[in-house]
Structure formats: structure tokens, C-alpha cells
Image (cartoon, helix red, strand yellow):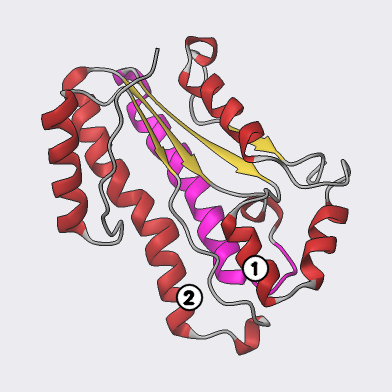
Amino acid sequence: MGKKAFFIKCDITDHTEIKDFFSLVTSKFGEIHGAFNNAGIEGEIAPFNESTENNFDQVMKTNLKGVWLCMKYEIEIMLKQKHGHIVNMSSTSGLVGNGFGLTAYAASKFAVIGLTKSVALEYAKQNIRVNSICPGFVETPLVDNICEKNPSLRRRFNNAQPMGRMAKPKEIAEALVFLFSDASSFMTGHNLVLDGGLTI
């Protein structure tokens, strides 16, 4: 049986818009049992010494501050209901860095893991679980955008993963279903890696 869903457009870097977003969500549904903080940008592709301060600020504002803002309101709601589960999107770039000219992106994803683990520790006794996932290269519009800017990267991305291909979005979604299910009820502060062997 299908479930009800609705879409709200908002800027995750804007405190007021995020506050209004969660007010609307709770007015419609009452509670938030699970939240997946997934919005992010790759930023410009450039050698570190040629990268710009503006790019660094934009990437960190979206990929890190955006997660922080969303978690702030998610935690407030989950504390009132005395349960909940949050999953944050990181990346293998947040584990081992990358050599593709995306240093700000990598820095933001390392920070997401640290944020996840710290919040998980803080709220473990309140029955709020907080985990993150670290996909390798996945066939998504973000990766397509990177490869359009530098076509040689698509083959490098495929070859970088020992399984010889990029992940399908469905493969990441199925891991999320596990994290939001009772099957993972004793997991918090964990970073689930889905990378085809990239970081072994």
C-alpha cells in the first residue's frame, strides 16, 4: 500500500527556512521517526592552490551547516517524542580524502562523520540513534555533473572501485532501509561504508 508524501522546497543553509520546514512537517505528521540528511553539493573542481574561498564557504555551508541545522530541529522534535533515528550523508571522501580536486567537499564530509558521532554519543540515552553512510561513487546527477566538467573522471571513478563499477542509487537506498529498521536497533554513531571495496 502506498504512503502519503509531499515536497517542500527550501534552502538548507537558511535557518528561517529550515525552522519553517520542520514546523510544517510536524503540523502534518505530528512526529518524525526518521530523517535522512542528504542534500549536498560537490563544489568546483580545481587543484587546492587554485580553489577559491567562496567555493570553500559554499560547500561547507551546504554540506556541513545544512546537516547541522536540520539535525538541530530533528533532535528537538525527537527529544519531545523520546525516540527517533537520523542518518547523515557522508562519503568515502570523508574517510580517505580524494585526489580529484574536491578538497572542500572532502573536508565537509569528514566533518559530517565527526558531527554524527558526537551527536550520537550525546543522545544515545534518549533513544535517539544517529548514524551516517559513506557511499563510494554512485550513479547520481551529482556525479554526472562532475563527469560533465571532466569527462575522464567517469572511467577513473569506475576503475577506482574494486567491483569495477559505480553503485546504483537503489543499493544505497536498501542500506538506508536497514538503518531505519529495527534490524539496526543497537547501532548508533556508526558510519556504514558502501563503496564496492574502495576503502579496504
Quarter holding the C terminus is: top right
Image height of 141 relative to 128, above or below: below
Left or right position of 15 against 181: left
Image: magenta residue range: 98-126
Image height of 30 relative to 11, above or below: above
Q: Earlier in the sequence, mark 1 or mark 2?
A: 2
Quarter holding the N terminus is: top left
User: Does the stretch in magenta take in 117?
Assistant: yes
Question: In percent of the image, x 40 and y 62: which residue is there?
Answer: 62
Image height of 157 relative to 45, above or below: above
Left or right position of 81 against 97: left
Depth check, front residue: 168 or 63: 168
Q: Label 1 vs label 2: CA separation?
A: 17 Å
Question: In percent of the image, x 87 and y 41: which residue is there?
Answer: 163
Residue lying furthest bottom: 50
Overall secondary structure of the magenta section: helix
Quadrant for residue 57, please give it.
bottom left
Q: Tell me the amino acid under the disc marked 2.
A: Phe
Give percent across and percent down for residue 159. 88, 55
Residue lying furthest front: 1
Depth check, front residue: 142 or 200: 142
Quadrant for residue 80, please give it.
top left
The residue carrying mark 1 is 146
Q: Tell me the amino acid under the disc marked 1.
A: Ile
| Dot 1 crowding, Cα within 10 Å, few <14, some 14–19, many 20+ | some
Give percent across and percent down for residue 164. 88, 46
The residue carrying mark 2 is 56
Left or right position of 27 against 15: left
| Dot 2 crowding, Cα within 10 Å, few <14, some 14–19, many 20+ | some
